[in-house]
Image (cartoon, rainbow, N blue to C red):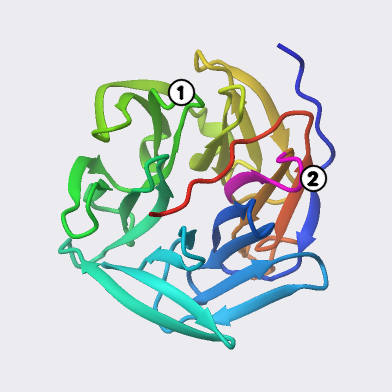
C-alpha cells in the first residue's frame, strides 16, 4: 500500500460560514455543494469565479444530488426535494418526522442503491435522543440506531459490505456489516475511538482503498484510519473546527473540508474558521451516489 502524500491545507472558498457542513462533489456537473446550517445558506461552487449562494427559507443540514438534476435535503424535522430555477429555490416536502422538540436532522448520505440515510441530533447537546434513519422508501423511514446525542457522518466501504457511522458525543466511529439490497446493518462494532486531544469525530468519508477519513471538531485535524481501525495519518489544519470532508476534483484526489466559525473567550474569531479548505492527495475518493 503506497504511503499517503498530501499538500498543505489551503483556503478554497472564503465564505465566512457559521456552520458549513455536508460537502458533496458532483462528478457529473463538477460542482462542490455545501450548506451553512445556521445561516440557512446553500453554496454551489464551480471554480473561484463561479460560486453561487442561495438563501434557504428552511434550515437544512445537507444538500444531496438526485438523478434528475435536483437535490434532496433534510431540515429540522422534514425531508425536501429542492429545485433551483432562475436563482429561485422551490421546495417539495416529501415527509415529516416526529422526533423530540430539540432534535433536528444532521448529516446524511445516499447509498449505492439511491436511498437516503440520515442521522439526527439533540440541538442542545444534552439528551441521548439522536437516531440513525434509513429511508428504503421515502415515506417509511426505519430507525436503526439510537442512544447517542449527536449522530454524524455516514459512508460505506468500496465493496459496499461495511457501513461506517459516527456518534460524535461518544467519540466513536462504528462499523456494521451491510447488506446492500435490503439496506440491513448488523454486527455493530467500534471501528475507532478518537483520542480526547483530537476533539470529536464529525463528518467522514471513505477513499477508494477503504481507508476512513474523519474531520475532528475542536481537534483541528483530519484523521485517516487504516481498514483495521488503526490511525494511519493525522493531518493538522489551521482551524479548530473542521466539520466534514469529501473527495472531489477532476481526478477525485482533492479532499474538500468544511469548517465552523470559532469565537474565543475574548470575542475574537479564529482566522479562516468557517471557510472551505482543500488538500491535494495521491489517493482517490469514491464517486458520490445520487438519490433515485
Using the image, determine if residue 16 lies above or below residue 236.
Answer: below
Q: Image point 51% across, 66% down: which residue?
A: 69
Which quadrant is home to the C terminus?
A: bottom left
Residue 250 covered by magenta stretch:
yes
Q: How far separated are the C-alphas under marks 1 and 2?
A: 24 Å
Instruction: Choose between 27 and 149: the one closer to the eye.
Output: 27
Which quadrant is home to the N terminus?
A: top right
The magenta segment: 243-252
Helix, strand or loop at disc 1?
A: strand
Q: Can residue 71 be seen in this view?
A: yes
Residue 226 covered by magenta stretch:
no
Q: Image point 39% across, 23% down: which residue?
A: 161
Q: Earlier in the sequence, mark 1 or mark 2?
A: 2
- Tell me residue 73's x, y (percent): 40, 65
- Tell me residue 256's x, y (percent): 68, 49
Using the image, determine if residue 274 lies above or below residue 89.
Answer: above
Q: Which mark is residue 80?
A: none
Task: Tell whether 139 sits left or right of 160.
Answer: left
Instruction: Choose between 69 and 223: the one closer to the eye.
Output: 69
Task: Tell whether 96 sits left or right of 108.
Answer: left
Using the image, determine if residue 237 lies above or below residue 173.
Answer: below
Q: Residue 192 carries which label?
A: 1
Residue highlighted by disc 2:
9
Task: Tell whether 136 sits left or right of 124.
Answer: left
Q: Image point 32% across, 26% down: which residue?
A: 178
The quadrant where residue 230 appears: top right
Helix, strand or loop at disc 2?
A: loop
- Tell me residue 192's x, y (percent): 46, 23
Instruction: Choose between 101 and 265: the one closer to the eye.
Output: 101
Amino acid at each position: 500500500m503506497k504511503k499517503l502524500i498530501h499538500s498543505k491545507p489551503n483556503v478554497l472558498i472564503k465564505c465566512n460560514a457559521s456552520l458549513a457542513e455536508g460537502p458533496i462533489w458532483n462528478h457529473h456537473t463538477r460542482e462542490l455543494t455545501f450548506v451553512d446550517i445556521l445561516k440557512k445558506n446553500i453554496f454551489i461552487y464551480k471554480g473561484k469565479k463561479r460560486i453561487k449562494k442561495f438563501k434557504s427559507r428552511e434550515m437544512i443540514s445537507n444538500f444531496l444530488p438526485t438523478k434528475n438534476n435536483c437535490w434532496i435535503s433534510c431540515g429540522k424535522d422534514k425531508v425536501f426535494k429542492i429545485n433551483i430555477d432562475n436563482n429561485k429555490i422551490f421546495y417539495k416536502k416529501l415527509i415529516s418526522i416526529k422526533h423530540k422538540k430539540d432534535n433536528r436532522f444532521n448529516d446524511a448520505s445516499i447509498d449505492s442503491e439511491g436511498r437516503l440515510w440520515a442521522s439526527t441530533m439533540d440541538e442542545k447537546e444534552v439528551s441521548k435522543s439522536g437516531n440513525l434513519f434509513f429511508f428504503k422508501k421515502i415515506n417509511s423511514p426505519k430507525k436503526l440506531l439510537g442512544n447517542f446525542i449527536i449522530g454524524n457522518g455516514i459512508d460505506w466501504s468500496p465493496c459496499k459490505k461495511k457501513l461506517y457511522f459516527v456518534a460524535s458525543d461518544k467519540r466513536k466511529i462504528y462499523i456494521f456489516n451491510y447488506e446492500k439490497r435490503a439496506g440491513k446493518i448488523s454486527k455493530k462494532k467500534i471501528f475507532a475511538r478518537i483520542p480526547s486531544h483530537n476533539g470529536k469525530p464529525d463528518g467522514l468519508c471513505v477513499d477508494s482503498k477503504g481507508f476512513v477519513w474523519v474531520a475532528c471538531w475542536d481537534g483541528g485535524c483530519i484523521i485517516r484510519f487504516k481498514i483495521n481501525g488503526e490511525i494511519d495519518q493525522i493531518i493538522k489544519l489551521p482551524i479548530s473546527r473542521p466539520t466534514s470532508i469529501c473527495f472531489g476534483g477532476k481526478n477525485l484526489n482533492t479532499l474538500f473540508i468544511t469548517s465552523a466559525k470559532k469565537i474565543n473567550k475574548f470575542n475574537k474569531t479564529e482566522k479562516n474558521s468557517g471557510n472551505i479548505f482543500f488538500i491535494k492527495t495521491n489517493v482517490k475518493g469514491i464517486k458520490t451516489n445520487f438519490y433515485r
